[in-house]
């Protein structure tokens, strides 16, 4: 199987599982909010947010480090499974202990603390181990197991949680459902891993632990900074303008944050390949990034056009009419995919080539630019100022990563000249402009993407290499019948 075909199949598998999660989990969150009420949903959100932060801190960037190193040393998989499973279990238990300590001193009843602790335990220990096991699947570029177990996890959590909610079990029912989904999926991951990849070897090599932790720290820093990057402006806006404007900005930013899932998910499948080939003399890493940037431009850029035309309707459809004042911020933030489709692959390219210090420098600089601009603009311009500072920081992040990739990995800036997807997006946006107040939301979105696809084809965006790759992904009927 060719490299491009393998990567494309892995992307389809990962995106398929991600789409399944993207449909069911927001629906599950809505059900939780409706059945628990504001107080119960607030408690659930607190436990979920706390555990999510501690997951990023507790794993210390280990999954990314495992993918990069194991892609080069697959013969050591038994040692990775054995020793690092123990390390990840210990960090997960330590994080769960911290959650228990925080809950112990929180003003909650003992009955209210137990379900919150179980939610934290399911994420920090069982989901944390799953993320580590999935990293091993990624290193071997076999995403089908990860996608399969992810679907099982979602179905169990959604099915058990919905049944318990409708039977009046409240927050404890949600906690139990999350425990069931996390433990069963983690066990499935471990069974598949030990049968397909290799039996674990428990050597308890402290030097190996130390090497992996030190090597993973930059990835951990990148994860924490990226997580905090999205919330800094909301906090500052709340201080300057109050919770209402902060909520409006957050509602617009979350739409953009969801769009970043597209390049991030695709790079989950591409990163192991980049790590495996290294800085190849034949330039395969540059060819791979060129194709990835092209396809991500085709996937990401139309959303900028759609948001530019339809921002108020999208905000009101998702959040309700009371959030329509967030539309100006969303119009500004809609330009972010123009940069994120390129800098997300570049960050992963730098990380795969042992240049992660440049990723850290770029993100730190942009976080400083974002915070400084927000401090200057938010007091006067409110959520518009916060949106402008976010967009400028995102543009700077693209510029910094493009510079570092060009200087240290010789990635030509010409790969970012994706004018055809941009022109197709602009064509679709201008075509739908007179109809934005006429067509219903669903019909508007469908019409927009049909016009966009037609424009892509008329501009001959895809060459012979792209068509050959597409044909290789379509099942051969004669081969299947045989």
Image (tube, helix red, strand yellow):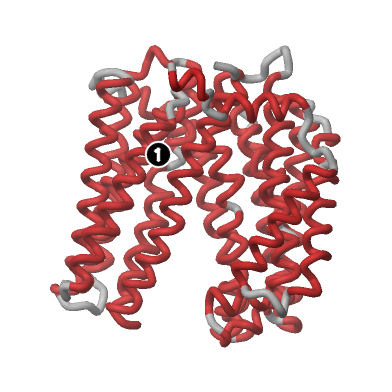
> Is residue 414 visible in the rendered structure shown here?
yes
Does 148 sit left or right of 23 as displayed?
Answer: left
Viewer-closest of 40 and 153:
153
Q: Is residue 198 above or below residue 264?
A: above
- Residue 270 location in percent, x, y? 57, 32
Q: Residue at x 67, y 68 (%)?
A: 444
Query: Which quadrant is home to the C terminus?
Result: top left
Lateral position of residue 162 relative to residue 448, left or right: left
Q: Give how far across and how far down residue 437 sits, in percent.
A: 72, 79
In the foreground, 178 or 466: 466
State whether residue 374 appears in this view.
Answer: no
Q: Residue at x 35, y 65 (%)?
A: 28
Residue 348 sits in which quadrant? top right
Closer to the camera in the image, 19 or 131 = 19
Residue 255 figure quarter: bottom right
Q: Residue at x 75, y 56 (%)?
A: 451
Count residues near mark 1 (Cα–Cα under 10 Å), then give few for <14, some for 14-19, many for 20+. Answer: many
Residue 131, placed above or below residue 45:
above
Local secondary structure at mark 1: helix
Q: Quadrant of the N terminus?
A: top right
Give the labeled residue for mark 1.
147
Q: How many marks?
A: 1
| Residue 169 left/right relative to 29 | left
Residue 330: x and y in percent read: 68, 71
Q: Quadrant of residue 378?
A: bottom right
Residue 200 lies, with reference to residue 133, above or below; the image says above
Please indicate whether residue 310 sits to the left or right of residue 30 in the image. right
Looking at the image, is 230 positioned above or below residue 150? Answer: below
Give the residue drawn at x 48%, y 35%. 64
In the rendering, at what x and y percent does residue 372 appear?
72, 66
């Amino acid at each position: 199987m060719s490299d491009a075909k393998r990567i494309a199949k892995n992307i389809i598998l990962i995106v398929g599982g991600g789409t399944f999660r993207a449909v069911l989990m927001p629906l599950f969150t809505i059900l939780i909010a409706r059945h628990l009420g504001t107080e119960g949903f607030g408690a659930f959100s607190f436990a979920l947010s706390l555990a999510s932060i501690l997951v990023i801190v507790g794993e210390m960037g280990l999954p990314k480090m495992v993918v990069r190193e194991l892609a080069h040393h697959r013969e050591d998989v038994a040692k990775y499974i054995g020793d690092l499973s123990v390390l990840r279990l210990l960090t997960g238990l330590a994080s769960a202990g911290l959650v228990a300590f925080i809950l112990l001193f929180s003003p909650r009843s003992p009955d209210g603390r137990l379900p919150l602790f179980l939610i934290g335990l399911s994420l920090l220990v069982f989901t944390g181990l799953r993320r580590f096991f999935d990293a091993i699947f990624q290193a071997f570029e076999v995403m089908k197991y990860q996608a399969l177990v992810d679907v099982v996890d979602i179905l169990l959590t959604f099915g058990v949680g919905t049944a318990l909610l409708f039977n009046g079990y409240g927050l404890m029912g949600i906690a139990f459902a999350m425990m069931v989904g996390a433990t069963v999926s983690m066990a499935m991951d471990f069974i598949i891993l030990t049968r397909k990849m290799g039996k674990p070897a428990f050597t308890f090599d402290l030097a190996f632990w130390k090497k992996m932790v030190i090597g993973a720290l930059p990835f951990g820093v990148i994860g924490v900074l990226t997580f905090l990057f999205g919330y800094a402006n909301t906090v500052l806006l709340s201080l300057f303008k109050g919770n209402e404007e902060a909520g409006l900005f957050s509602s617009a930013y979350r739409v953009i944050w969801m769009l970043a899932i597209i390049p991030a998910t695709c790079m989950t499948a591409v990163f192991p390949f980049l790590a495996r080939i290294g800085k190849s003399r034949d330039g395969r890493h540059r060819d791979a990034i060129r194709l990835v940037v092209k396809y991500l431009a085709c996937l990401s850029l139309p959303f900028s056009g759609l948001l530019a035309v339809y921002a108020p309707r999208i905000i009101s459809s998702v959040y309700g009419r009371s959030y329509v004042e967030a539309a100006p911020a969303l119009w500004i933030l809609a330009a972010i995919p123009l940069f994120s489709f390129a800098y997300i692959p570049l960050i992963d390219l730098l990380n795969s080539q042992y240049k992660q210090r440049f990723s850290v420098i770029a993100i730190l600089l942009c976080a400083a630019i974002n915070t400084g601009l927000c401090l200057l603009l938010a007091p006067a311009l409110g959520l518009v100022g916060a949106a402008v500072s976010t967009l400028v920081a995102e543009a700077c992040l693209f510029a910094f990563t493009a510079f570092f990739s060009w200087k240290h990995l010789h990635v030509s800036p010409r790969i970012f000249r994706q004018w055809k997807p941009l022109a197709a997006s602009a064509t679709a946006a201008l075509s739908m402009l007179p109809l934005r107040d006429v067509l219903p939301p669903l019909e508007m979105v469908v019409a927009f993407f049909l016009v966009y696809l037609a424009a892509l084809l008329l501009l001959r965006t895809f060459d012979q290499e792209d068509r050959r790759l597409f044909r290789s992904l379509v099942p051969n009927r004669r081969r299947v019948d045989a």
